Amino acid sequence: MSDFNDFPPGSMATLDESGAVRSSLVRRLEGMQSSEQYRSLLALVRTETIEVARSIDSGAPEALADGQTFKDLGFGSLAAIDLHARLTAAIGLELPLAMAFNHPTPAALALYLQRVLGLSTVAEEGPTPVTVPHGESVAIVGAGCRYAGSAESPNPLWQLVFDGREALVDFPSDRGWDLDGLYDSDRSKPGKRYVQKGGFL
């Protein structure tokens, strides 16, 4: 994983051929594979997030759990602004102030930074295709479904589709609903139903 300690804030920004500013960090990321770029940006976001969290609460953890949100860490507007300032300084590019709210986890924010920096993202690369040798058997070990029209296995479902039948039935009487009290032919009545049939699981 990349070490970002050698990138002091605002240092070593250069112009590329198009005249755009490219910081040392961005130029370093450009030499990496997409997945490595993402891991490096995630490490940066996590490091700065922990620093901000510890400035709010000295007892904050030194590591972040997967999927932990900025809100979980007690981030409010001031903390989000602090994180924005730290990442802007590290990257050398002015970023949106609301990015921590629009991308509420370090993982989501790292992916956003990868996009906004013009780098290819892991998501854009897509999964590596899996090649199955010709003639190799494929086993379906289980399948289940539950749809309207009493289609509780694949065969009745496909038969329902094949026949082009509607799966609408009368409202069930075994679910504890007050069917008479719920019905009203006036569509404008709140909390009432005006239809006589529906598709039920």
Image: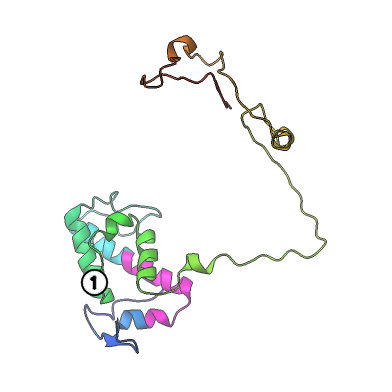
Q: Main secondary structure of the magenta part?
A: helix
- Mark 1 packing: few (<14 Cα in 10 Å), some, or many (20+)? few
**Magenta stretch?**
28-45
Q: Is residue 57 visible?
A: no
Taking the view exactly as shown, the residue that stands out farthest to the top is: 180
Seen at 45% across and 20% down, the residue is: 193
Q: Residue at x 35, y 68 (%)?
A: 113
Closest to the observer: 198 or 131? 198
Percent x, y for residue 14? 28, 87
Quadrant assignment, res 168: top right
14 sits to left or right of 123:
left
Q: Which residue is mark 1?
A: 94
Looking at this view, is 167 or 74 the one in front?
Answer: 167
User: Residue lying furthest left in this view?
Assistant: 78
Q: Amino acid at mark 1?
A: Glu
Write down the quadrant of residue 84 in the picture: bottom left
Residue 95 position (above or below residue 24):
above
